[in-house]
Amino acid sequence: MMPLSMAKEGEVNTIIKVGGKEDTRRFLENLGFVPGGDVMVISGTGGNLIVNIKDSRVAIGRDMANKIMV
């Protein structure tokens, strides 16, 4: 288990758990970051990650990505 921020680009990972405060978890769940879901890091530039989740591309900050365990 590792944070999403450490995942390799182009590799499909399964979300194990989403941490953080209740409002943060709810925000991430609304974007599609739910346990059991697949996520792939497209690119990491600066402090942000662009990920592919549920056939959508989403940009999240590295601090948010650290709360998503894959």
Image (cartoon, helix red, strand yellow):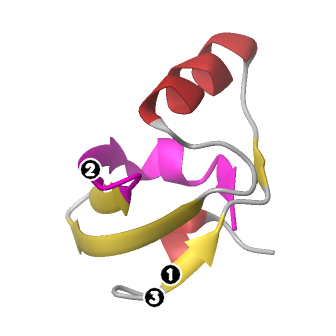
Q: Nearer the viewer, residue 2 or 36?
A: 36
Residue visible at 50% across and 81% down in the picture: 12
Residue 62 appears in the figure? yes
Q: Amino acid at mark 3?
A: Glu
Q: Position of residue 57 (x, y in %)?
A: 23, 53
Q: Amino acid at mark 1?
A: Val
Q: Is residue 64 magenta?
A: yes
- Determine whether, in the image, residue 31 is placed left or right of residue 27: left
**61 shown above or below 22:** below
The numbered dot on residue 48 is: none
Mark 3 Cα within 10 Å, few/some/many (few <14, many 20+)?
few
Residue visible at 34% across and 87% down in the picture: 10
| Residue 15 picture quarter | bottom right
Tell me whether circle 1 and circle 2 mark residues in contact (CB < 8 Å): no
Q: CA distance from mark 1 to mark 2?
A: 14 Å
Kindly identify which residue carries mark 1.
Answer: 12
Extreme-left residue of the structure: 45
Tell me which label, 1 or 2, sits earlier in the chain.
1
**1 shown above or below 65:** below
**54 shown above or below 51:** above
Report the span colored magenta: 53-70
Kindly identify which residue carries mark 2.
Answer: 56
- Determine whether, in the image, residue 28 is placed left or right of residue 40: right
Residue 7 appears in the figure? no
Kindly identify which residue carries mark 3.
Answer: 11
Q: Position of residue 43 (x, y in %)?
A: 23, 74
Q: Nearer the viewer, residue 66 or 42?
A: 42
Residue visible at 79% across and 59% down in the picture: 16
| Quarter of the C terminus within the rendering | bottom right
